Image (cartoon, grey):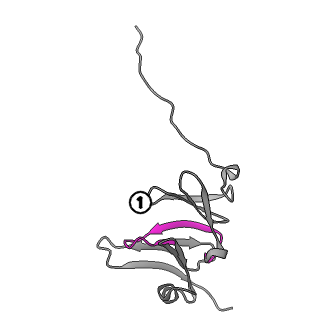
Amino acid sequence: MGHYSWSQDPYYINYTTNDGLPSSTIYSIYQDARGFLWFTTDAGIVKYDSHAFTLYNTEDGLSDNEVFQMKKDHKGRIWLLTLNGKTCFFYKNKLYNESNSALVRKISGSSLLVDFYEDTKTTAILFLSMETSSN
């Protein structure tokens, strides 16, 4: 006696540099509220809108091209955790860093941003950082 079952093959797409990614090194992928996919790479951050890839890098205000992770806060700012540890965020289609944001200047200083957490009531953001030596 045989048993039959219906199934289907999983659907997936493999994106490469041939499709428009600036690098084959992808550290993380994030999907925003509008459905865009964001890739953190060693060449910057990339937004994919299901048609084209848009690269943002140091020429656009990113503090370092090597971005390991993205995290969104309750205001919709996407904080970028970079190799050099310099604080920056993406908000309303613009990159903010020490040169154009008082908030980033306040957070920065002699420390490197390594992670952040927001409490459940969204009343506080805890930035984890490492002090850098001046030597």
Q: Residue at x 57, y 51 (%)?
A: 51
Q: Residue at x 52, y 80 (%)?
A: 129
Left or right position of 123 against 129: left
Quadrant position of residue 84: bottom right
Q: Position of residue 63 (x, y in %)?
A: 61, 78
Nearest to the observer: residue 56 or residue 8: 56
User: In the rendered structure, does residue 125 fall within the stretch colored magenta?
Assistant: no
Q: Position of residue 47 (x, y in %)?
A: 56, 61
Where does the magenta region start and end?
Answer: 62-79
Quadrant in which the C terminus appears: bottom right
* Total residue callouts: 1
Q: Amino acid at mark 1?
A: Ala
Whether 101 is drawn above or below 115: the answer is below
User: In the rendered structure, does residue 76 fall within the stretch colored magenta?
Assistant: yes
Nearest to the observer: residue 36 or residue 16: 36
Quadrant in which the N terminus appears: top left
Q: Residue at x 59, y 72 (%)?
A: 82
Determine the residue located farthest toward the bottom in the rendered image: 134
Determine the residue located farthest toward the left in the rendered image: 121
Determine the residue located farthest toward the front in the rendered image: 51
Q: Residue at x 47, y 67 (%)?
A: 71
Q: Position of residue 60 (x, y in %)?
A: 62, 75
Residue of label 1:
33
Whether 117 is drawn above or below 49: the answer is below
Q: Secondary structure at mark 1?
A: loop
Graded by Cα atoms within 10 Å as few (under 14), some (14 to 19) or many (20 or more), the crowding at tag 1 reads few
Q: Position of residue 83 (x, y in %)?
A: 63, 72
